[in-house]
Image (spheres, rainbow, N blue to C red):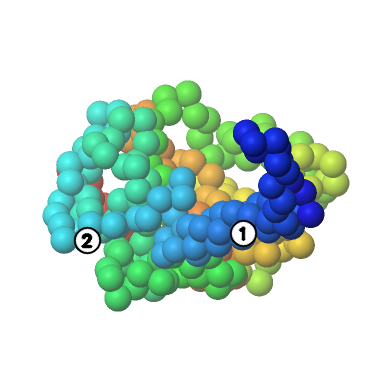
Amino acid sequence: MGGKLTEDGEIQQHSGWLIPFAVAVAIALLCAALLLYYLRPFALGRNGTAPFRDSRDSAAAIPVTVGRQTFIIPRRYLEPGTRGGGDRVDLVAALPDMRGFTENDAELFAANAPDSPVVHLLIRGNRNAPDTNDRFQRIYLPYVTNPQGEKSAYGLTYYSFKPGSGYGGDDLYAGPTKDLLFLCERPAQDVPSPNCLTIDRSLAPGVNLSYRFKRSQLPNWRAIEDGVRRLIAKFRR
């Protein structure tokens, strides 16, 4: 029990457990609010925002300019935060047909499962970016353990990185002419849903393209590459 002195000089008693109880209730309510926030649909969207919140105009074509290259892109392909171009445009599509967002696929686009079919594309301006083969020779090759590479089961050449090189948690796969590089995260306790990232390559002078997908989709890299190329060609003007 606790108490306080009233203006009449009397001690007013109150239960000592009321304050801790109130604090506990407040903490529980706060935790519940945070849980609901992070479990809401699209919590895994870019910057924690819900992509495509207004799908009424999802088919509307939006002109987007990066550098001097203009793209006409249906809104359903645009990641949250993309407005009218500038330095970068973020896109999203789903395998196998590289379709954009629809309400029927809302859960699919929100998920981050290891076998997710969602592909994230990035078009950005960078006039100083080296070409893919130059990047391979100067940035990656000095840190691999097998400079000649090894043939993988996917028709790609596999390179493993030296431990402690900064890429120790990744694997590198190269296409037949090394104009296509995949930097893939290795599965780990802190990487339960690993990705593969294609290294920047040129779309136009000063405009580059890269994209990422789940590592489990790597055996389908040819279909993904073809789908990305067709999609970008459709958007270019």
Whether residue 126 is situated above or below residue 220 in the rendered picture: above
Q: Residue at x 56, y 69 (%)?
A: 113
Q: Which residue is mark 1?
A: 25
Position of residue 155 measured from the top left corner of the image (x, y, whole percent): 60, 67
Left/right placement of residue 209 relative to residue 212 reads left
Answer few, some or many: residues within 10 Å of disc 2's Cα (few below 14, many 20 plus, some between 14 and 19): some
Distance between the alpha carbons at the discs numbered 1 and 2: 38 Å
Whether residue 18 is situated above or below residue 113 in the rendered picture: above
Answer few, some or many: residues within 10 Å of disc 1's Cα (few below 14, many 20 plus, some between 14 and 19): few
Q: Which residue is mark 2?
A: 55
Q: Quadrant of residue 190 in the image?
A: bottom right
Q: Residue at x 49, y 29 (%)?
A: 129
Left/right placement of residue 208 relative to residue 83 reads right
Pair 1/2: label in front: 1
Left/right placement of residue 22 relative to residue 234 reads right
Dot 2 lies on which element?
loop
Of the pair 128 and 94, the residue shown nearer to us:
94
Q: Quadrant of residue 204 in the image?
A: top left
Whether residue 138 is situated above or below residue 76 in the rendered picture: above
